[in-house]
Image (spheres, rainbow, N blue to C red):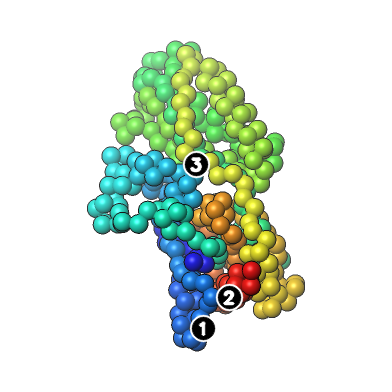
Amino acid sequence: MTAMGSHLDTQPRGGRYDGILGIMSAIEVMRTLKENGYKTRYDVGIVNWTNEEGARFPMSMMASGVWAGKVPLEKAWAMGDIFDPSVTVKSELARHGYIGPIACSSQGYPLGAHFELHIEQGPILEENSRKIGVVQGAQAYRWFTFTIKGRDAHTGTTPLKSRSDPLLAASKMIASSNAIAKELGALASTGVIKIPPSSSTNTIPSQVTFTLDIRHPEDSVVDDVQNRVLESFSTIAKADGRGVQVEWTLDTDSPAAKFHPDCINAVEDAATGLFGAEGWLPITSGAGHDSVYTSKVCPTTMIFVPCKDGVSHHPEEYCSPEDCANGTQALLEAVVSYDKLRASK
């Protein structure tokens, strides 16, 4: 089956287009094929990948990772809710009756190719007045969770030299990661910081947990950022008072991806036919997508359309009806073109 895939899950303050556009456009493609009586040589279908965002269960591109054999099923099932670890992916799937009989694997449910329409989530297409981004691949990224352990203490009676302050250390670590990434031309971001619910104004917290997201188009640079960050964090942990303890886990590791030339050519031809050679741009995705994992197993590419001001993961995320339609038409024509290519081989 040639799949048109994306996701319906979103961010807590997400938008109405990230992922959702890809699913709705695929439905429209299927409807158009049926209404026009067009019969493809190979099956064409839709995949809605579970937990692409990793917002509630902090492992991005989870279902596609399991399908591609890059994430063990038991590891995915055991992932806990970010605010209530007693609730797991498996327990929620079971509660909703969504643990099905077909294996989530490329052996149990093989795909012949994977196309994904998505908003760009950046400003490049809009700034260059282009209708379509033909995605060549995606940059590498890694997600970490750091736990900094200290000791509760009274803020008014404990001298600085006697403190084991995890919040002070965590704040310095977050700033340090940003400086290291900037120096190496990478990105480092913290999206979640948690302290115990028992924390109070006049008590040093006992523990701080924070996330770290490192990204760059080259795997080697992500390696360099990670190594320097860990070295810096170790130094910071010893710098103030009695120091703190640092523990960390690697939650997601997504190497840089290069998409398949046949799929890319199908999208280029569709975009050129619709908007001319100046109507589209080759582009690399700064975000991770399910297509990153599918590209490890089957021919894959993505189609980007502009989003207003490049805004995403925000309530103001917006893609105009015209751009949604343009992307959907490009998706339809690319899938039909690729189907003909497969049949000719």
Tell me the amino acid under the disc marked 1: Tyr
Quadrant position of residue 96? bottom left
What x and y, as percent, mark residue 317?
Answer: 51, 63
What x and y, as percent, mark residue 343?
Answer: 60, 72
Report, in whole angstroms, how far the alpha carbon at label 2 lies from the one at label 3. Answer: 34 Å
**Residues marked 1 and 2 touching at CB (< 8 Å):** yes
- Pointer 2 or 3: first along the chain: 3
- Pointer 1 or 2: first along the chain: 1
Which secondary structure, mark 3?
A: strand
Which residue shows up at 46% across the image and 82% down it? 34
Q: 119 or 339, which is in the foreground?
A: 339
Q: Which residue is mark 1?
A: 38
Which residue shows up at 47% across the image and 13% down it? 242
Q: Which of the two marks, 2 or 3, is nearer to us in this view?
A: 2
Report, in whole angstroms, how far the alpha carbon at label 1 lies from the one at label 2. Answer: 10 Å
Residue 118 visible in image: no
Q: Which of the two marks, 3 or 1, is nearer to us in this view?
A: 1
- Pointer 3 or 1: first along the chain: 1
